[in-house]
Image: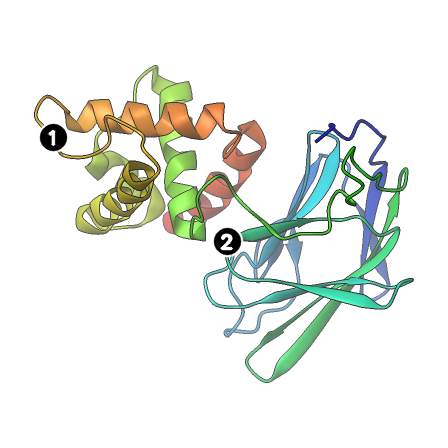
């Protein structure tokens, strides 16, 4: 498949008559985040995120229960995102819909960029749902990987599980269970050094997991905003 090198353009989102330009290359939204939708207690603190990566604008569902709908307004088509999934924003005029409790919400938006292009096989880039990486990751598993990355950037090494867990507001047991689940998935696709075999240390498997996530584009610097948002909630 050929890479899409067209200009994705600017992304402008509208909520309740207010237009917000996503000029930093990303924007989270929900009960908190960059764009506060509502104080509805049934809404996740972070419902979704717009992210520009590799020449494409993406919509990511970063919640744990709610489903998002990405609507192409001009074509009158709708695609659904389960938690942990992302879709490219291919439409020039789009809407994002979701429900929280008994309330329904809609964001509308405009992408001022080139049309999405067909690849060499004749398939339209951006028509299929894509998970965060080679393996399906839950939002919390994705956040765990971001925490490993942030720790390595900040200290030059990956800190211990108890320190990382505290940054997320998790218990040490929860952190280790989430890490075990990620390692199990990676082991099943053939990655060595992540399962509890002889000679594999806890530090070593965390390094292996982080190397895999970075080399496969599962996490990037833009993802650090997710951790900052969660950490600020823990501190509050």
How far apart marks 2 and 1 lie (CA) works out to 29 Å
Secondary structure at badge 1 equals loop
Q: Quadrant of residue 187?
A: top left
Q: Residue at x 24, y 35 (%)?
A: 163
Q: Residue 84's mark?
A: 2
Residue receiving disc 1: 197
Residue most extreme to the left: 198
For marks 2 and 1, give the one nearer the viewer: 1
- First in sequence: mark 2 vs mark 1: 2
Within 10 Å of disc 1 (Cα), the crowding (few <14, some 14-19, many 20+) is few
Q: Residue at x 35, y 45 (%)?
A: 168
Q: Residue at x 60, y 55 (%)?
A: 48
- Residue 236 seen in the figure: no
Residue 65, percent from left and from top:
47, 67
Q: Quadrant of the N terminus?
A: top right
- Residue 25 seen in the figure: yes
């Amino acid at each position: 498949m050929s890479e899409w090198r067209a200009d994705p353009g600017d992304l402008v989102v509208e909520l309740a008559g207010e237009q917000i330009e996503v000029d930093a290359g990303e924007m989270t939204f929900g009960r908190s985040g960059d764009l506060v939708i509502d104080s509805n207690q049934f809404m996740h603190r972070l419902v979704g995120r717009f992210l520009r990566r590799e020449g494409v604008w993406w919509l990511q569902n970063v919640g744990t229960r709610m489903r998002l709908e990405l609507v192409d307004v001009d074509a009158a088509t709708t695609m659904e995102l389960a938690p942990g999934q992302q879709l490219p924003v291919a439409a020039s005029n789009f809407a994002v819909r979701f429900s929280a409790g008994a309330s329904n919400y809609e964001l509308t938006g405009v992408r001022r960029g080139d049309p999405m292009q067909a690849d060499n096989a004749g398939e339209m880039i951006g028509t299929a749902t894509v998970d965060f990486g080679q393996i399906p990751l839950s939002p919390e598993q994705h956040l765990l990987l971001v925490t490993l990355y942030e720790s390595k950037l900040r200290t030059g090494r990956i800190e211990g599980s108890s320190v990382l867990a505290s940054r997320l507001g998790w218990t040490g047991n929860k952190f280790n269970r989430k890490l075990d689940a990620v390692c199990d998935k990676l082991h099943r696709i053939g990655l060595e050094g992540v399962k509890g075999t002889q000679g594999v240390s806890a530090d070593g498997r965390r390094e292996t997991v982080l190397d895999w996530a970075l080399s496969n584009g599962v996490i990037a610097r833009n993802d650090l905003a997710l951790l900052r948002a969660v950490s600020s909630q823990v501190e509050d």
